[in-house]
Amino acid sequence: MSAKVTSAANQPNQPTHAEPPGVTAHMREMTGLTELSFDIARGRLLKLSTETSQSISMSLPLSTGAARSTEMVIKGTMTLEVLDRR
C-alpha cells in the first residue's frame, strides 16, 4: 500500500517561535510518499518507508535597505522494518 502525503504549516501573522529580529521565514508545503508492507496472514506490519521534502525561504533586511535571502530544501527518509528474531 502506498500513499501521497501533503502537509502545510499554519503561519499566523505573529510568529509563534523565536526568530531573530528582522528575519522572516516561510515554510512551504511538505510533500512525501509513504509505503506500507503488511503480512496479512500474521496480521502485522512488516515495513514502513517514508520520504518527505519541504522548501523553506528566509530573508534578513540589511542596513543598506537591500535584503539577503536564502532558500533551502529539507529532505528526509525514514524506514522502519520489523525483524523476526526467533
Image (cartoon, grey):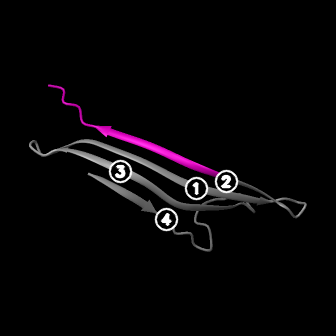
Q: Which mark is residue 34?
A: 3
- Quick check: marks 1 and 2 in contact, CB under 8 Å? yes
Q: Amino acid at mark 3?
A: Thr
Pick whichever, 29 or 22, lies toward us. 29
Residue 18: x and y, percent? 63, 59
Q: In the rendered image, which residue does mark 4 sit on?
A: 8
Q: Amino acid at mark 1?
A: Ser
Magenta highlight range: 71-86
Q: CA distance from mark 1 to mark 4?
A: 11 Å
Mark 1 neighbour class, 10 Å CA radius: few under 14, some 14 to 19, many 20 or more: some
Sequence-wise, which precedes: disc 3 or disc 1?
3
Q: Please identify the dominant SS of the magenta region.
A: strand
Q: In the rendered image, which residue does mark 1 sit on?
A: 55
Name of the residue lying farthest toward the bottom? 13
Residue 76: x and y, percent? 48, 45
Mark 4 neighbour class, 10 Å CA radius: few under 14, some 14 to 19, many 20 or more: few
User: Can residue 78 be found in the magenta stretch?
Assistant: yes
Q: Amino acid at mark 4?
A: Ala
Residue located at (36% from left, 40% from top): 79
Q: Amino acid at mark 2?
A: Glu
Describe the element under mark 4 as helix, strand or loop: loop
Residue located at (75% from left, 63% from top): 22
Quarter-of-image position of residue 83 = top left
